[in-house]
Image: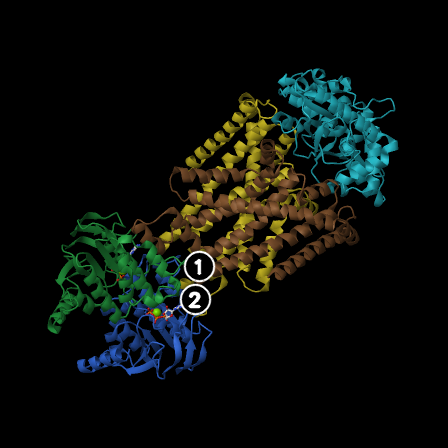
Chain colours: A cyan, B green, C blue, D yellow, E brown
Amino acid sequence: SKKNKEITKVSYRLKWLFNTSVAGDIYADVNGFFAGEGLDVEVKEGGPERDAIKELEMGHAHFGVASADQVIRAVSKGAPIVVIAQLFQINPLQWIYRSNETKINNVEDLKGKIIGITFGGNDETIMRALLSKYSISEDKLNFFSVRYDYTPFYERRVALWPVYRNAEGVIIGDKLDTAKEPVSFFDPNNYGIHFVANSVITTQNMIKQHPETVKIFITALIKAWNEALNPANSDKTVEAIHKVDKDTPLDIIRRQLDITRQLMKPTDKTVFGSIDVNAWKETERIMIEQKLISAPVNIEKRLRKEF
Amino acid sequence: MIECKNINYKYHGTQYPVFNDLSCKIDEPGFHALFGLSGVGKSTLARLIAGQLDGFTGKIDNKTGKIFYSYNLERLPGWSSVGEHIAKVTPVQNKNRINEIIESFGLSSCIDSGFSHLSLGQRNRINLARYLLQDFDFLIMDESLANVDEATREQIIFKIKDMYPQKTFLYISHSVAEVSMFCKNIIVLRSFQKSPQSLTVLGQDDTTGKSVERKNLEKTMLEIVNVS
Amino acid sequence: MIECKNINYKYHGTQYPVFNDLSCKIDEPGFHALFGLSGVGKSTLARLIAGQLDGFTGKIDNKTGKIFYSYNLERLPGWSSVGEHIAKVTPVQNKNRINEIIESFGLSSCIDSGFSHLSLGQRNRINLARYLLQDFDFLIMDESLANVDEATREQIIFKIKDMYPQKTFLYISHSVAEVSMFCKNIIVLRSFQKSPQSLTVLGQDDTTGKSVERKNLEKTMLEIVNVS
Amino acid sequence: MFHKRLYQFVFIYILGIGFLFLIKKVLNLSDYVIPSPVEIYETGRKVFLRYIPDVLNTLSVAIIGHVLSIFMATIIGIISRLSNWIGSFIKTAAFNIQAYPIVAVAPIIFILLGDGLSSRLLIAAMICYFPLLLSFIGILSEPVVDIEHFYVHSGKMRWQLEVKIRAFENMNKLVTVISGSATLAMVGTIVSEFIGASSGIGYSIRIALYQSDLAKILIALFLIGIFTSLYLAFLEWLGRIVVRKWEHNS
Amino acid sequence: MFHKRLYQFVFIYILGIGFLFLIKKVLNLSDYVIPSPVEIYETGRKVFLRYIPDVLNTLSVAIIGHVLSIFMATIIGIISRLSNWIGSFIKTAAFNIQAYPIVAVAPIIFILLGDGLSSRLLIAAMICYFPLLLSFIGILSEPVVDIEHFYVHSGKMRWQLEVKIRAFENMNKLVTVISGSATLAMVGTIVSEFIGASSGIGYSIRIALYQSDLAKILIALFLIGIFTSLYLAFLEWLGRIVVRKWEHNS
Ligand SMILES: Nc1ncnc2c1ncn2[C@@H]1O[C@H](COP(=O)(O)OP(=O)(O)OP(=O)(O)O)[C@@H](O)[C@H]1O
Ligand SMILES: Nc1ncnc2c1ncn2[C@@H]1O[C@H](COP(=O)(O)OP(=O)(O)OP(=O)(O)O)[C@@H](O)[C@H]1O
Ligand SMILES: [Mg+2]
Ligand SMILES: [Mg+2]
């Protein structure tokens, strides 16, 4: 019937700028993974003011990448979206600090420090969840409102600064390395906070009306990601990324890729893209706890694992 | 045809009135004058008659039709030559008069210039010319020829009287000789403290072909000076 | 004291010159006139003498001292009354003349008004008054009294001649009778096609207390009209 | 006067919201993309009072920034009257600085000034001074010959007088530009708060934006509109008084 | 003329950079806060040529946006001459819309219009039309009595004529505002690229900012300055021609 007619031309809105975090997406595009399956996919860059979920609803895109807190918030407001793959198994959001000046060996060590927080961002949620888990009251430490530039951290007005471990983490770390200032990263994952990061999403409508398209898309995408993250294809991946991310030098991309691999495929056994239902439930729980959503949304019902 | 009855007028924020129970009238077509010392209220009366001021008491009866008010500080827009402007604002039925007026006003050499490139007297004349080309019934000329030389002024007045015998003009000028010579009635405006505030003197109403006796002219002039 | 020698001048973008080998001079203090048909170049010559135009050939010799150029379209700023403005721009040594000038110019009732609330003739007079209160040697009055009535004008001219017997004035006016009566020399400016382009006629130079014979006046007037 | 501005603003705001609801209806969008009226109302109840001090904070910075930039624009306008190299140079500098998008320059400003009030003020002023500057240059560099002639001629012209004459003759235009640029001061402050500060309504908007909470943004925009309208109305009232007073004198 | 603008800009730029270096020296800041001259030079060599097409891309959008907003401002300016409710309403609407910081409104624009050229254009136009509007309103709503008298009096006044008269009498001011607002069109485009687009120099600045690469930003600012100066010089040249032509006629 007409309703079930599959479409071949789709667009895919990423969450962020072209960089190593979207290695597989670029790889798929450049190496014809979609075209090979008869799909014409327009891979569109994301950005700070971009919201893939809204674009899916508006019909500007068919697939997209969104962070888990975005997804849960949208579902709580009735957005008809479905998660079809989870990109990061470990949340890349970590805090960078100068290891020779700041010593952090456990959560207690955060006390008395000035910590950068993007108010309203998911680093705030993660940090609050961590503090609540360890029963540390917020008046024991100082939050600093984070903005685009790193100067307060550079100038040592802030001790810990939130970064994406696999993206800015490498670049900023590199800059400080050059200045002979060793850095470390504070990773909430190590302290039992499993807050899901980016996932691939689509709409319920797409799944209902064009199930084949969705299947072909996600299969090709996961295949591409697996190849992109395969150390044997490292050079090929790095080159593909550099083509669209000219501003980042090759060697940095290479190191970013290594770290990305650890966050997306922490072990050899990890199946890329697998959805960690428990982590999603925890994420939802944290958000309820922090009153970011008012009622449970049963997020597990929106996780589509099989195709 | 135009009658002002018991007009009282005072500018906002001033101490003394300009008009105190002023009455005057113009009851036939032709070339009339409004005369008086500087600051006595000629321009104010002209603007009242033209309907450009309100806030007065009394009554202004207009049975003439369309009144136009021209004054000597008016300017023409700068984007084309004065000739083009004149052609543009002249109603079709009066187009045939353009050349006649331009020539007799001594403006032939100016029509290709921009307004801002004219001498003062040329500006006066161009401005007056465009008013004469409108379909007016009553035209107030507030010092409209103030910066034109006497010879040209005379020529222009004769021309106007020739061309528009059925229309009414109210000519404001500071030349006693001129208004005595060329005007039918001269309304002499006086200080608001005097009563009546205006008196009408009969002028010589000179036209081309007619000659005015010197004695009569001097009598009129004297009369004007006496009542002023 | 001021001498123009062989002046040639043409406005940019125009076809004909305004001056073609014009020479004229004013060689004594007093009240002189510049006369001519509208558009003949009086204002242009005035601006040349005042140093406000360049691009002419020939020579202008100024041995008089400080030249001022006043014209009838000037305005005073609007933020205070004309009286305050006058007080402000008058050099200390001339302050004592303010009242005399204001009174004899018939401006007493205006000094508390803003400039934009004055009649045309009042504006003319206020403007001229402030120039007379400067330390000038030579004052050009370009139709500076054009919108003032004849009686007041006469009074003003007498006053000026009384007060400033040692200074030089160049009075531009369109009234033949007036320039003939009050001026020493009348420089009559003519079309650039005529040679010489200017002629000087001797006037009656009337002052208070002196009386001019009617016959002489008429002779001067005729002479001016003849050479124009 | 004040009433009229407010009514007009509320009317426009309702139009805008209505338009959003229409789109929501037509495209059948979820509350996530465009919040429901109920959600907006609920959010309004929750944050309205909390946002008011934020807006007032922003407004006060905006007003100071506005005054500051009127000042700056006046000075540059006066300098650029000079036809020499310095005047032209200052004018170019003023133009070039404006050509830099605040988002690119803001980091440098924050490096230099820190993230206190001064950065916010500077950015607010930078954004609103340019329209002022343009008008001021336009007005202050055009002679009013019939008035200036006497002063120039008699050697009495001082730059203060020249500025006064030209400003006075263009009073209405100045009032329009000054009161109009008030909204830009507000915008500038909000942008600077959005980019870097940690107080003010712009900061609240940024947080709401991170949370994809359009309802909060709509409430914030409502409050911004109300207070901007009030400030505008106040300036217009002031302008009318000044104009009337000056015209009365003249 | 063109040369002069360029020289002046380069001089200002060097002044600015020098000032940064001075601060770096005085506060003893490290290379990652403010890059060293060598690093700037190296970065310049690498990205200069790559940024040129980006800037040209931005410039072309800016020019279209500029023309668009001149158009918009003219229309609103004309409408707001009407002294009735509609005129005042449209004026309020124009003011209120401007009072909304683009950073808050841009997401809504992107949601509604997608990320094509149209969003970029709209944002560029929104940012630069306001100064234009303010001046246009100021100029178009002030009668030139001595010229308009005849037309009003003789019943010949049409709104087109009224606009023409007032615009002509204020030609110099208009040219200043129009050429000046060109830089704002540039700013608007850059901001929109920064927020949402995926091409243009604003996009490149955003990337550099996320990488905390001030050297690249400085190079980008240099190029923006150069091309903006050129556009400005071009507009001023055009303005002079127009003014001369009109003045010649008059
Ligand atoms: N700026 C200008 N550009 C071109 N031509 C001009 C300009 N100013 C005046 N003219 C022309 O030069 C001639 C002389 O003008 P000028 O103003 O000197 O005359 P005038 O003798 O003062 O006349 P009026 O008595 O009417 O004031 C006129 O024909 C006039 O059209
Ligand atoms: N807008 C105004 N506000 C207040 N007073 C005014 C205004 N306009 C004119 N006046 C005063 O009203 C009186 C009459 O002015 P009006 O212009 O009618 O005189 P006039 O007879 O035309 O004089 P002139 O021959 O000098 O042109 C004058 O004393 C003048 O000062
Ligand atoms: Mg008058
Ligand atoms: Mg003249």
Q: Is mark 1 within 8 Å of ligand 2?
A: no
Which quarter of the figure has residue E147? Answer: bottom left
Q: Quadrant of the C terminus of chain E?
A: bottom left
Q: Determine whether A48 is above or below B221 in the image.
A: above
Horizontal side of B142 relative to D219 (left or right) equals left
Q: Is label 2 in contact with label 1 (beta carbons under 8 Å)?
A: yes
Look at the numbered disc 1 and give the secondary structure of its residue: helix
The residue tagged 2 is D151
Residue E194, image x, y percentages: 66, 40
Which chain is home to disc 1? D
User: As rendered, which of C9 and B133 lies closer to the eye?
Assistant: B133
Q: Tell me residue C112's x, y (percent).
A: 32, 59
Which numbered disc, 2 or 1, marks the residue that appears first in the sequence? 2
Q: Which amino acid, mark 2?
A: Tyr
Whether residue A49 is visible here, answered yes or no, is yes
Task: Estimate the x, y position of residue C177 in percent, counting from the top left.
Answer: 23, 75
Q: Which residue occupies 32% across, 57% down?
A: C117
Q: Residues within 10 Å of mark 1 (few under 14, many from 20)?
A: many
Q: Residues within 10 Å of mark 2 (few under 14, many from 20)?
A: some
Q: Which mark is residue D165?
A: 1
Q: Secondary structure at mark 2?
A: helix
Amino acid at the residue labelled 1 = Ile
Ligand 4 in which quarter: bottom left
Measure the alpha-carbon separation of dots 2 and 1: 11 Å
Position in image of residue E83 (x %, y %): 38, 42
Left or right for A155, reference D54: right
